[in-house]
Amino acid sequence: MSMAEQTDWDDDGRPRKPAVVGIGAQKAGTTWLSQILSQHPRIWTPPFKEAQFFNARYVPEHMKWLPWHFRRGKLNIQKRFDARGEEMPAHLKRYLARVTREPMFTNHWYKMMFAPAPAGTLPMDITPEYSTLPEQGVEFVSKFLSNSKFIYILRHPVDRAISQMKMNITRAGRKPATVDDWMQEIQDPVLYDRGDYATYVPRWKQYFGDDQLLILPFGAIARDPLGVMRQVEKFLSIRPHDYRNLGNKVFASVRGLSVPDEARAALRARLEPQFAYLESAFPKEFTEQIR
């Protein structure tokens, strides 16, 4: 369950590492996975879906926005309590004060994130940016979290890029109106970096075997969400649970932003190496479910 709604809490818990880590990809169902899996009584999540620990260490440019990420997270939690006319519990106030002050992003800070998880639960960190770590970052993860299990969701490369592009456009307040405007938008290198499966998937598979790394196709979430969760439960060795709102979409498509065919075709051409990789690395029944 979400820690903002958490009833099970070990205020004297010792710092510990996460047992479950969702590594991506961005715009590929990680928020859905977090919201559904956090309902399981064996899973414990901190208030920040994305702890951002490893990319803070190995992707320096992310430090431009990470302080904002945690300030916003803390503020949003306070707003939820305010909206209900409730006082935030003292233990949660102490926790938020601790994890949002310096020093942040140290090994101890990361383990403090999961300290309140009660005995017998599996702490979880879902941070999509982890999938894009450089090789030395993945190697560090393999040593630091040698006993953890990782979940990586892969989405149709064009669909994923378009979803990310729409999110970025909306956040920036841009309104592309012409085909030329959209052709300019698809030049953003971030769109291709976050979905570079041909680089990132082999990197993670180099350090983690099937017993530690579960790779799922995004489309299976819509087709058979309960089946996806049964697969996740088996991977994590936790008993089946009766989940709520399995079929809910977490983020609806952005209205008023329709990508013209010319831009879609250009994206497809740019992303052809990703399709080639997926077809060579995964069985047909997997690639048929990435959208």
Image (cartoon, rainbow, N blue to C red):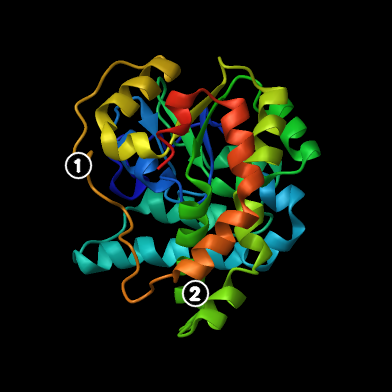
Q: Quadrant of residue 83?
A: bottom left
Residue for badge 2: 169
- In the image, residue 205 lies at what x, y percent? 66, 25
- In the image, residue 217 lies at what x, y percent? 44, 34
Q: Quadrant of residue 40?
A: top left
Crowdedness near tag 1: few (<14), some (14–19) or many (≥20) residues, C-alpha within 10 Å: few
Q: Which is nearer the eye, 76 or 169?
A: 169
Label 1 secondary element:
loop
Q: Is residue 102 above or below residue 284?
A: below
Name the amino acid, label 1. Asn
Residue 17 in view of the camera: no
Q: Residue at x 75, y 33 (%)?
A: 140
Residue 220 in view of the camera: yes
Q: Residue at x 61, y 26 (%)?
A: 281
- In the image, residue 163 lies at what x, y percent? 45, 60
Q: Which is nearer the eye, 97 or 76?
A: 76
Residue for badge 1: 245
